[in-house]
């Protein structure tokens, strides 16, 4: 299986640079995973494709303002860092730019000394381990000094930080938003619940590896990044009950999907789990938990378009993407949505 088999042509002007004024006004393409049939709607129409007894699985991670700008102590040279993974109360794995001079022992000052970072190690892929020293509460300092780490394809400045958070975000830890959930408003979620659709919450802290291009020619040669997830007893109970009663488990986003499929064992009910996952889902994968998926339109040749293709078939997905380009859908994080389901049921 070749990476280039998941390529498609995307005009640059279709990459959404800003969120819509109202979250649920985004467009929605409904794709039948068995036939490839498509229907064009708006996201607020999603209720028409949900049924009483279904379960929506949402990722309640919260994006932290993980991009920090500072200066080298001594020389004053500018440094940009991106917090990737929390290792302890004071230590983080980070991406540092420029990287050449970022050697162990180097100190960086942020906010005129409000926060000091010291590089203590260099790890896989050139990332740095940084030990931070500060007075007060780290999260409050980060909220004051940090910026939202928007993906590299978004060049516009975000005017409202909350638009890169889902309305149900709870637990700090992500370097990127679980973007499929950005389309939901609180009102729409309440309407969905009133229909008799259950909501199960999981947590997966999204890393920037989600945007990392696949550099190998063969899909199977790609090494997936790891991300931390938690699946609670409450979520397991809701999902297991849904399955037992013949309802559908509808994952909101690839991150919710990866959480469930990482925790699942074939033929067994879900049990609470937490830890790091490197699950790589591509065509040929047999899904153990999810039946349907709500997602955005993903980058060409990415692991995310491979995951979507595992559920709906590569040919169906690429044909749907070609149609989305023709119909001028908006792509990627602030773009429009797709629901992969079974329209014939």
Image (cartoon, rainbow, N blue to C red):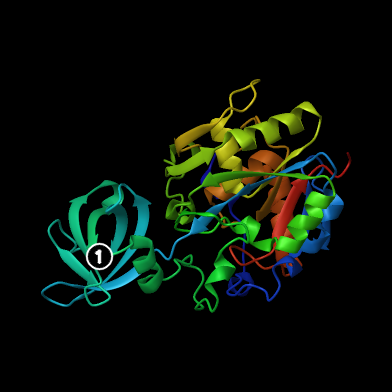
- Residue 66 location, x and y as percent? 39, 63
Residue furthest to the top in view is 267
- Residue 182 location, x and y as percent? 64, 61
Q: Residue at x 75, y 65 (%)?
A: 27
- Residue 141 location, x and y as percent? 34, 68
Q: Which of the image's four quarters has the N terminus?
A: top right
* Snapshot quadrant of residue 137: bottom left
Q: Is residue 95 above or below residue 16?
A: above
Q: Is residue 310 above or below residue 64?
A: above
Q: Which residue is drawn at 51% across and 78% down?
A: 156
Q: Residue at x 89, y 41 (%)?
A: 344
- Residue 60 location, x and y as percent? 57, 51
Q: In this view, does 144 lie to the left or right of 259?
A: left
Q: Is residue 295 above or below residue 26?
A: above
Q: Which of the image's four quarters has the C terminus?
A: top right
* Snapshot quadrant of residue 165: bottom right
Could you tell me which secondary element the residue under label 1 belongs to? Answer: loop
**Residue at the disc numbered 1:** 135
């Amino acid at each position: 299986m070749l990476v280039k088999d998941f390529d498609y042509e995307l005009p640059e002007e279709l990459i959404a640079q800003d969120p819509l004024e109202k979250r649920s006004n985004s467009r929605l393409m409904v794709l039948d995973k068995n036939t490839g049939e498509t229907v064009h709607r708006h996201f607020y129409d999603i209720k028409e494709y949900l049924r009483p007894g279904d379960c929506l699985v949402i990722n309640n991670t919260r994006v932290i303002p993980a991009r920090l700008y500072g200066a080298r102590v001594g020389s004053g040279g500018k440094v940009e860092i991106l917090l990737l993974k929390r290792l302890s109360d004071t230590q983080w794995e980070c991406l540092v730019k420029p990287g050449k001079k970022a050697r162990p022992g180097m100190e960086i000052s942020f906010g005129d000394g409000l926060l000091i970072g010291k590089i203590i190690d260099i790890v896989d892929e050139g990332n740095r381990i940084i030990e931070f020293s500060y007075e007060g509460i780290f999260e409050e300092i980060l909220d004051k000094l940090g910026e939202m780490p928007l993906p590299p394809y978004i060049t516009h400045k975000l005017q409202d930080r909350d638009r890169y958070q889902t309305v149900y975000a709870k637990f700090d830890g992500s370097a990127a938003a679980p973007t499929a959930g950005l389309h939901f408003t609180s009102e729409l979620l309440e309407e969905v619940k009133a229909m008799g659709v259950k909501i199960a919450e999981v947590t997966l802290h999204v890393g920037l590896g989600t945007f990392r291009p696949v550099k190998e020619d063969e899909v199977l040669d790609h090494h997936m990044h790891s991300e931390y997830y938690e699946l609670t007893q409450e979520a397991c109970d809701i999902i297991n009950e849904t399955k037992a009663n013949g309802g559908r488990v509808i994952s909101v986003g690839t991150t919710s999907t990866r959480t469930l499929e990482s925790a699942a064992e074939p033929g067994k009910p879900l049990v609470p789990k937490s830890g790091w996952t490197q699950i790589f889902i591509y065509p040929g994968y047999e899904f153990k938990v999810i039946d349907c998926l709500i997602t955005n339109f993903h980058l060409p040749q990415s692991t995310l378009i491979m995951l979507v293709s595992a559920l709906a078939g590569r040919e169906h997905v690429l044909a749907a993407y070609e149609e989305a380009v023709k119909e001028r859908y908006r792509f990627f994080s602030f773009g429009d949505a797709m629901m992969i389901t079974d329209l014939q049921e």
